Image: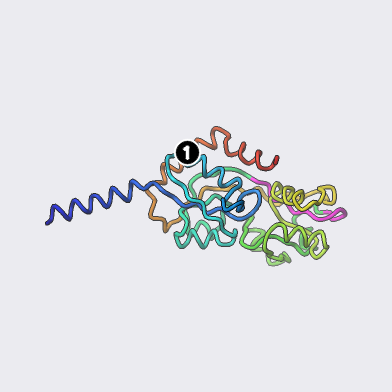
Amino acid sequence: MKKLITLLLFMLTVSVYSEDKLTIGVFKILPYGSLEKGEVVGIIPDIAKRLEETSGIKIKKKLLPYKRMIQSLESGSIDFAIFFLSNRSQEVSNKLIPLYDLNTIAVGLKGTKISKYQDLYKHQLATPRGVRYSPRFTNDEKMKVNYVLDYNYAIQMLINKRVGVVIAPEKILMFQMQKLGHKKSVLDKPFILTTNTAWVQFSKKSKKKHLIDKLIKASKTLKDNKEVIKIIDKHYSL
């Protein structure tokens, strides 16, 4: 009987570890993640596909609102995600490797001059809920921030002059402006608020920690081969 129990435990362990599967959280912001004809597509899904091919790990994609990324990492309902670091994200996940950088800007319509950080105090600001760009900005009680559904909503608030300034990663903002049919020329010169880095962040509650080394190795390969940048540039040129 002891031998049978030992054998069953061994087979169970082998079965668990042979299922090299991870779930990645994909935030629902164009062009990083969206649903098309029932399929999750975008920059993060394309990166996930190459990680899958490079590591041999099957990766399931789960589309989420940005605000739910941290909640999902905290619960372990996703194993990892690729997005900006924050104090909260570091409480619930382990940062594995940085993948790409994005300049985050503050920008208003023509005539809205922003030359220094303190100029932001004069304006109503808009940015999506759940995004954290820097501790200084997030914790600044002088900032009049309207946290909204997404970047599209923030842009529409700006165009309709319901806010004076939008805070957003520059590439995302320009992409969304184009999709909405607004010309870049309606904007004033952007002020670079900070440069944010997207990290591979792995849930502390994940039961697949034995796959971390493979994931790091595959991520490093894509980064070193400039594949991550190529994927990003491809989507922004569409």
Q: Provide residue 185's location: percent of width, then percent of height.
A: 84, 47
Q: Which residue ends up furthest to the left in the rendered image?
A: 1
* Region in magenta: 102-113
Q: Provide residue 106's location: percent of width, then percent of height.
A: 75, 54
Instruction: Residue at 45% x, 54% y: name it.
Output: 79
Indicate yes or no whether the magenta region holds residue 186: no
* Foreground residue among 73 and 9: 9
Q: Provide residue 88's location: percent of width, then percent of height.
A: 53, 60
Query: Within 10 Å of the Cα at label 1, are there few (<14), some (14-19), or many (20+) other Cα atoms?
Result: few
Quarter the N terminus occupies: bottom left
* Foreground residue among 96 and 29: 29
Q: How many marks?
A: 1
Instruction: Residue at 61% x, 51% y: name it.
Output: 36
Question: Is residue 89 depicted above or below 100 in this figure?
Answer: below
Image colouring: rainbow
Q: Which residue is mark 1?
A: 53
| Label 1: which secondary element | helix
Instruction: Residue at 69% x, 64% y: name it.
Output: 148
Question: Is residue 21 depicted above or below 204 in this figure?
Answer: above
Q: Which residue ends up furthest to the right in the rendered image?
A: 111
Indicate yes or no whether the magenta region holds residue 104: yes
Quarter the C terminus occupies: top right
Residue type at numbered disc 1: Glu
Q: Which residue ends up furthest to the top in the rendered image?
A: 225
Q: Is residue 112 left or right of residue 135?
A: right
Q: Is residue 66 left or right of residue 107?
A: left
Q: Is residue 67 left or right of residue 142?
A: left
Q: Provide residue 39's location: percent of width, then percent of height.
A: 56, 50
Instruction: Residue at 72% x, 64% y: name it.
Output: 143
Q: Which residue ends up furthest to the front in the rendered image?
A: 37
